[in-house]
Amino acid sequence: METLEQLYTTLKESLNNSDFVKLTLSKPNRKGDGLPNVYIRLVRIKNEEMFQFTYHYTTNDQVKNYTYEEACEELEILMTESFRTATLFMLSGDLLVFVSKKKKITYRSTAASFKTQLPETHDKPKEKRAQMGAYLRYLGITDANDKVIPKMADKFRQINKYLEIIEGLLKNAHLPKHINIVDMGSGKGYLTFALYDYLVNTKKHSASVTGIELRQNLVDYCNDISDKCGFDKLNFVAQRIEEFDNSKIDILIALHACDTATDDAIYKGLVANAALIICAPCCHKQVRQQVKGITQESPLLKYGIFKERQFEMVTDTIRALILEKNSYQTMVFEFISNEHTRKNVMLVGTKSNKNMDASTIDTKIKGLKEAYNIESHYLETLVK
C-alpha cells in the first residue's frame, strides 16, 4: 500500500532520532475476528533491536518479534486487511493514520502523548495462573516438592492456557454473585480442579463447581481429592450428561465430550440459559455416519482425511449457528497447539441481549445441510 509510505518514513526517522515510543493498531474491520488491537514496541533480544507485536485477541495474547523490514511487511498486511486506525507515538508528537472503507489513507499529527520511552525489555515471564496447590500433587502433575513432573509439563501448560482463556471469557459474561459451574465429561478432573482453585482460592469468586462423569471410579477418585484439598463447593457426580437435570447453570463446560455428548451438554446450557457455554468438541461421528455411501459433489470430500476434517467443521459450524439463534455470541478458536492434540478447537457461546434473525440463521443451517447431504444435526433435533 503505497500511501502507507509516510508511516514507514516517520517510523524510520523516529528510530534514527531515538524518538519512538510505541505503535498501536485499533478499530478492526471485522469484530468477529476476535482481534481488537495490536500493540507494537521495541525490545532488545540478544543485543538486537526488534519490534515486538502483541496481538491482543479476545481470549488470549500472542507475541511475535520482527526486524524493521519484517515489521513493515506485517504492518502492510494488518492495515490492508484488518485495521482502520494506527497511532505512532513519539516523544516529539503523535502520528495518526486512518484507513477508509475504500482504502484511502489520511494522516493527522497531534501533540505527544508520552514524555518518556518504554523500557527495551523482552517479554515478561508468562503468568502462571495455576497455583502450586495440593491438588496438583494428588493428580500427579507435581512432585512432593511442588515441582512439575517433566512428563506432565504439557498438561500443566494446558491448565494455564485454559485458565487464561477462562479469565478472558469471564470479562464479557454477565454472571451472578454466586456462579454455578457444571463441567460435563470432567474425566480425571485436571481442568475442573484447576478452575475451582483459580476462581475460588485465587480470584476469590463465590462459586460452586460440579463435575459430571460417567465412570464411577473417576468420580470417587476426584471426590476423594476434593475432600483432601478442602474444596467444599467442588463435587463430582456419576451420571450421563443427558440425565443431568439441574437448571441452575451459569457456566456450562464440556471439554472433549465424545460425539453427540457435546450436543447434549450444549443443550443443557441452552435450557439453563447459561451465561457462558464452553466446549471443545470431540470425535464428530453423528454427521459422518449418516452420509456414509452418499456421493458428495465437493472435491474436498474425495479424500478420507479431508472428508473427516470437513465434516468436523460442518458439525461445529451448525452448533455455533444454533447457539447464535439462541442469542449467544459465538467464537471458535484454537485451544492448545496442534503439536499436543488435534482435538484443539474450542467453541464458546456468550449470552447476549441481542435478538438474532432466526430465519436467516435457519437458512444458513439448511444451506449447509443441503450442500453436504445431511439429513439432521443432533443438537438441532434436541432444540426442536
Image: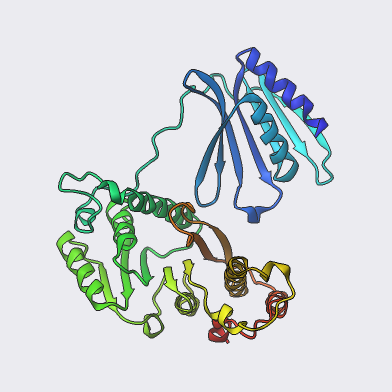
Q: Quadrant of residue 51?
A: top right
Residue at 78% x, 26% y is 5
Name, please, the residue furthest toward the top: 17
- Pinpoint residue 337: horizontal percent, then vertical percent: 47, 51
Q: Position of residue 30 (x, y in %)?
A: 69, 52
Q: How is the image coloured?
A: rainbow
Residue 178, x across and y down, in percent:
35, 65
255 or 229, nearer to the observer: 255
Q: Is residue 103 above or below residue 137?
A: above
Q: Nearer the viewer, residue 315 or 235?
A: 315
Determine if residue 252 is in view.
no
Q: Going 41% across and 65% down the picture, which residue do you hit?
A: 176
**Quarter of the image holding residue 190?**
bottom left
Q: Quadrant of the N terminus?
A: top right
Q: Is residue 333 left or right of residue 9?
A: left
Which residue is pictured at 33% across the width and 50% down the height? 156
The location of residue 27, given as percent across then percent down, is 68, 44
Vertical placement of 305 versus 89: above or below?
below
Horizontal side, residue 296 vs residue 213: left or right: right
From this viewpoint, is residue 382 visible?
A: yes
The answer to whether 307 appears left or right of 6 in the picture is left
Q: Is 358 on the left-hand or right-hand side of 226?
A: right
